[in-house]
Amino acid sequence: MKLARFSRIGFILAAAGSAVGLGNIWKFPYIAGEYGGGAFVLVYLITVVLIGFSIMIAEMLIGYLGRKDTVTSFEELAPKNSGMWKYAGLQSLAGLFVMIYYSVVIGWIFNYIVTSLSFLPATVQEAESTFNAMLHTDIATQLFYHTLAFIWITYVLTKGIKGGIEKMNMVLMPALMLILLGMFTYATTLDAFGQAFEFMFSPDWSKIDSNAFVVAVGHAFFTLSLGMGAIMTYSASMEKGSNLVTNAFWVVFLDTVIAIVAGLMLFTFLYQYGAGPAKGPGLVFISLPAAFFEMGIIGNIFAVLFFIALAFAGLTSSVSLVEPMVQYFIDRFKWSRLKASLLMGLFFYLIGIIALLSNIDSYREALTWGEKNFFDWVDYVTAAIMLPMGGLVMAVFVGFVMQKQRVEAIMKPQLGFAFEAWYFSLRYITPVAMFVVMLSLLGILE
Ligand code: PFF
């Protein structure tokens, strides 16, 4: 059977679809708000260029050479008698774990698409109580939309690389970009655009501390979809003879531009119609709807379009979070794609229900350990442990374990004089940065 491969543009859009997700539009603006705007954005951009880009190329390389699921790819590229490396491929599990809460959040977004058609909250207080009522009391609505997300994602996965993943990204990614571009253009005509620009780009150096650095590295990883086998799995279906550096460049570029465009647009609306740059996860679900209300009827249209774009971003990332494990069961256990997709889908769907319930008032206590409920634990364990560990393992693998000649043969012609810099970054800069991030997120390093 001939293996399905992405077309060149299909690969770039699918990998960019993976990268551009809730991280860009939901998380990035609120962390930027929390860490003082410009200073954080600057550190984040530096980390994306120095660490993110190198790891993206490394991850693509493993997938491209391995041509299989992540476990097999590591196994085959490791020197003989070092079978332990196959366990590195288990980083793909992290994607499935992220889906546990990711799907619930996509459910909230679906709900907001529908409700924004006819209702927007008049004040931030009203927006807050509307959001909290959904989050803490409304099981039925959340469950309904979480189910819808599960069906959509699983269906696309059953259709495979070409007919499912590529096809979906070829439609949703351009649509997402068009919507954001349209809204961004409108935002540039508003007075508050200058303020938003200043907030995002004028660094307040007093806000830069080691914590901002850790958060920036962690976020750069999450937003670029690194350390979970997603980019690796997609790269296994990259066309032969592809240029990994160009592909990685496009993915990093699109991801970064979209995060910045979305951030500038959101903060413009918040300055112009709301209470300024809000903090916290409620930014897009609380402050933003209240700002849209102030725009009148155009606000409803914008709100619906905005949440549609956010849903598209989330859905294209979701398939990439689950595909690595689907591929794993297809390659290693010879499961059919239908069976693998369905079972992986059911896994995140059913455990997602527990995450959903852990936000509900009457279940929260039973589903809370220490300071975090189940939902937050999943986010924490994936972001603080699994993701940096995945990055660390990948950098060490390409930097030290794989034969240098093998890496050089492919990467030197593509990277030219930058090859040594890239290799150095993988060997020394990235592993240290990952280690520091992990220790610090675990609270071992203050
Ligand atoms: N990059 C996605 C986002 O920014 O929301 C999330 C993500 C997708 C992380 C796929 C990791 C991954 F493997």
Image: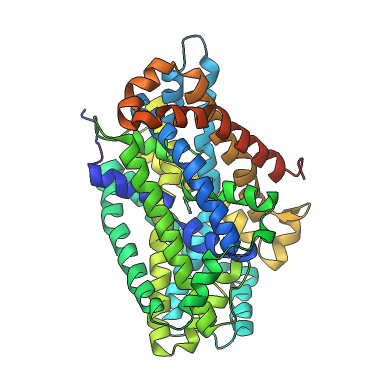
Say left or right for 106 vs 308. Answer: right
The quarter in which the N terminus is drawn is top left
What is the quadrant of residue 441 in the picture?
top right
Tell me where residue 392 sits by quadrant. top right
Q: Is residue 278 above or below residue 213?
A: below
Indicate the position of residue 30 as horizontal and vertical percent values: 58, 64
- How many numbered marks, from 0 up? 0
Above or below, 174 relative to 236: below
What residue is shown at x 37% (from left), y 53% (from top)? 254
In percent of width and height, residue 129 lies at 63, 79
**Is residue 64 in view?**
yes
Percent position of residue 178, x then y: 30, 67
| 61 lies left or right of 346 | left
Residue at position x 28%, y 60% from top? 174
Locate residue 291 relative to residue 354 in the image: left or right.
left
Does residue 422 appear to the left or right of 384 in the view shown? Answer: left
Tell me which residue sits at (64%, 44%) in the image.
384
In the depicted view, which residue is nearer to us: 77 or 140? 77
Say how the picture is coloured.
rainbow
Task: Name the image quarter holding the C terminus.
Answer: top right
- 428 relative to 7, above or below: above
Residue 45 in the image: x percent, y percent? 50, 52
Residue 67 visible? The answer is no
Q: Is residue 275 above or below residue 178?
A: below
Residue at (45%, 31%) from the top-left corner?
422
